[in-house]
Amino acid sequence: MSRSLTGVAQHKKRMAAMKKAKGFIGGRSKLRRIAQGAVIKAEVRATIDRRKRKGDFRRLWITRISAATRLAGISYSRFIEGATKAKIELDRKTLSELAIHEPEAFQLVVEKAKAALN
């Protein structure tokens, strides 16, 4: 009796990796062993960068809010302190969108934050 190999399952697994490696440059898309390593590394990086993206966006929102508050004559940190004291419960994403699309409304929020500081 011949030895049973997991031929179909292994072939399917290898082909799945090659399919994921499609579009990679050189041997990373052509050679099975190299492609499998490249796919694993790409998936690891994708996971890390999905988590990193959240911090990147928060940094962007803070930069936008800071620029808008400086135009209103207050620093970002003082604005956030005033907003906390005034119990303004808008998150940074919303404040950033207000600063860009509704400058008048953002100005009102800044005035309330300034008033709470005094």
Image (cartoon, rainbow, N blue to C red):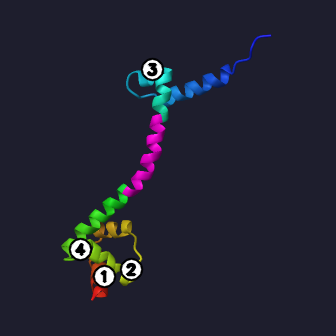
Location of residue 111 in the rendering, given as x and y in whole percent from the top left corner: 27, 83
Is 4 located above or below residue 18 in the figure?
A: above
* Element carrying mark 2: loop
Q: Disc number at residue 30? A: 3
Calculate the distance from the C-alpha at mark 1 to the C-alpha at mark 2: 8 Å
Residue in view at x 31 percent, y 86 percent: 116
Residue at horizontal 34 percent and vertical 70 percent from the top: 95
State which region is magenta: 41-55
Position of residue 98 measured from the top left corner of the image (x, y, whole percent): 32, 70
Q: Magenta span: helix, strand or loop, mainly? A: helix
Of the image marks 4 and 3, the number of the one nearer the N terminus: 3
Circles 1 and 2, Cβ within 8 Å, touching? The answer is yes
Foreground: disc 4 or disc 3 = 4
Amino acid type at circle 4 is: Ser
Q: CA distance from mark 2 to mark 3?
A: 56 Å
Which residue is identified by label 2? 88
SS for tag 3?
helix
Give x and y (percent) for residue 16.
56, 29
